[in-house]
Image (cartoon, helix red, strand yellow):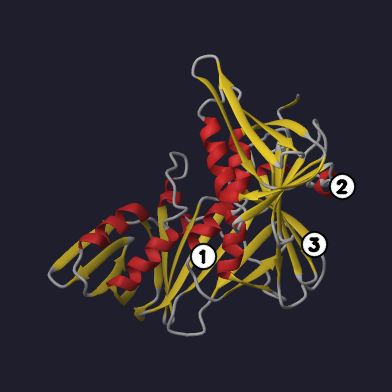
């Protein structure tokens, strides 16, 4: 195998695929990037057995072949080399790398030892804007919690319905739903559960990309492909296994009516809850009291060791007086992810779920369960 490629282009490829390369004492090959040269395309691939990333770019190739090279080592090495064209030559799984006056030899592994990446038939893709997709995922990334008893809630639900994608995450104490609207109908309604780690990798890989992503589905795998309109630009493929199981029927817990609705400033409400969290004690409890007559929302907390806190803010309030305690971390997470200057905080009763929403949008909701009734 012999390749000539610009250093910055190879560095870009390694930076992309190294996101999921990992240490493994049982499978050292997982610490490696599979470098493959075929026709005029250089392809770099890494995997952690759950997910894989491939980066493909144009290069001058005078000899086809492949080798596996330690990812972190190669990434660090490229950082020290001059910004000149690189010559990569592989003989007996030794990568000879030349750049100007620099010449190195890197011990590699047989590419036959690299895990086989499952292939998905690329038909009828779901097309979605990369930036919008990643921003939607970011709003839910930190909600799922690891559960061996209920692995399905360890992941993120994607429900595809005509021109709508619903993205849902829960940890049993809170739940968020984000709606994304697409221009072209999906071929048929379907749903899948993506591991939380894979969702984070998707944001890391595609979050700053401009343009569209093509999503392909199979019963056990998801494939996301990014290709620029410029044929000279590299393409990226990300694939992940899916979590088996049936996601809870979360729509049953979304309240149909509310006893109290509060409209308040997001910034002021968030600041008061954060301040109250400093006094919340070991159970992270912050109390929210709604006074309809005074049109005030009171935020309070107390700790035997630190003291107590109380503040209030005005708002537009409809319904009944109520007093509910929440885990401050869950409450802060929900407020933070809502876009806009104002939020709607909807209460059912003292023991039922409360719902946070944007003021003028129906594309996001955040359900939070109270700690206890007061």
Which residue is found at the position 25% from the left and 73% from the top?
Answer: 86
- Figure quadrant of the C terminus: top right
Residue 141 visible? The answer is: no
Residue 332 horizontal side relative to residue 253, left or right: left
**Percent coordinates x, y for residue 287 in the rendering:** 66, 30
**Which residue occupies the extreme left position in the image?**
101
**Distance between mark 2 and mark 3 Cα atoms:** 28 Å
Rounded to the nearest whole Å, what is the CA distance between mark 1 and mark 3? 23 Å
* Residue sitting at x 58%, y 41%: 332
Q: Position of residue 215 (x, y in %)?
A: 65, 69
Let me know if residue 96 appears in the view: yes
Whole-number angstrom distance, CA of label 1 to CA of label 2: 38 Å
Residue 257, which numbered label? 2
Q: Quadrant of residue 369 in the image?
A: top right
| Crowding near the residue tagged with mark 3, few <14, some 14–19, many ≥20 C-alpha atoms within 10 Å | few
Q: Badge 2 local density, few (<14 within 10 Å), some, or many (20+)?
A: few
Closer to the chain start, of discs 1 and 3, is: 3
Instruction: Indicate the position of residue 210 as horizontal and vertical percent values.
Output: 51, 74
Label 3 secondary element: strand
Residue 190 numbered tag: 3
Query: Closest to the observer: 331 or 211?
Result: 331
> Which labelled disc corresponds to residue 206?
1
Between circles 1 and 2, the one closer to the viewer is 2
Q: Is residue 72 above or below residue 91?
A: above
The numbered mark at residue 360 is none
- Compared to residue 71, the image places residue 274 above or below, namely above
């Amino acid at each position: 195998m012999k390749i000539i490629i610009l250093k910055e282009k190879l560095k870009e490829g390694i930076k992309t695929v190294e996101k999921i390369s990992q240490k493994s004492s049982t499978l050292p090959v997982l610490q490696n990037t599979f470098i493959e040269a075929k026709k005029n395309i250089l392809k770099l691939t890494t995997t952690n057995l759950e997910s894989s990333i491939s980066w493909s770019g144009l290069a001058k190739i005078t000899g086809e072949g492949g080798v596996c090279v330690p990812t972190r080592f190669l990434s660090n090495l490229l950082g020290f080399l001059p910004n000149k064209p690189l010559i990569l030559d592989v003989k007996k799984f030794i990568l000879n790398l030349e750049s100007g006056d620099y010449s190195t030899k890197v011990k590699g592994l047989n590419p036959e030892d690299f895990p086989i990446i499952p292939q998905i038939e690329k038909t009828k893709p779901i097309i979605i804007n990369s930036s919008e997709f990643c921003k939607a995922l970011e709003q839910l990334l930190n909600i799922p919690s690891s559960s061996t008893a209920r692995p399905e809630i360890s992941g993120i639900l994607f429900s595809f319905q005509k021109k709508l994608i619903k993205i849902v995450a829960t940890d049993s104490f809170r739940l968020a739903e984000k709606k994304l609207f697409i221009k072209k109908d999906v071929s048929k309604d379907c749903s899948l559960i993506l591991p939380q780690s894979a969702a984070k990798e998707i944001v890391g890989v595609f979050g700053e990309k401009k343009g569209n992503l093509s999503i392909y589905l199979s019963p056990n795998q998801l494939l996301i492909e990014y290709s620029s309109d410029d044929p000279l630009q590299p393409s990226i493929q990300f694939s992940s296994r899916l979590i088996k199981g049936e996601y809870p029927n979360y729509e049953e817990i979304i309240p149909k009516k509310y006893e109290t609705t509060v409209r308040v400033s997001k910034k002021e409400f968030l600041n008061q809850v954060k301040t109250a969290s400093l006094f919340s004690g070991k159970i992270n409890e912050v109390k929210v009291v709604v006074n309809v007559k005074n049109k005030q929302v009171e935020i309070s907390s107390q700790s035997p060791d630190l003291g107590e806190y109380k503040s209030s803010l005005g708002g537009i309030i409809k319904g009944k007086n109520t007093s509910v305690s929440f885990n401050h971390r869950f409450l802060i997470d929900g407020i933070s992810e809502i876009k806009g200057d104002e939020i709607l905080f909807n209460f059912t009763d003292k023991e039922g779920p409360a719902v946070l929403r944007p003021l003028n949008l129906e594309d996001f909701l955040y359900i939070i369960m109270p700690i206890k009734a007061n």
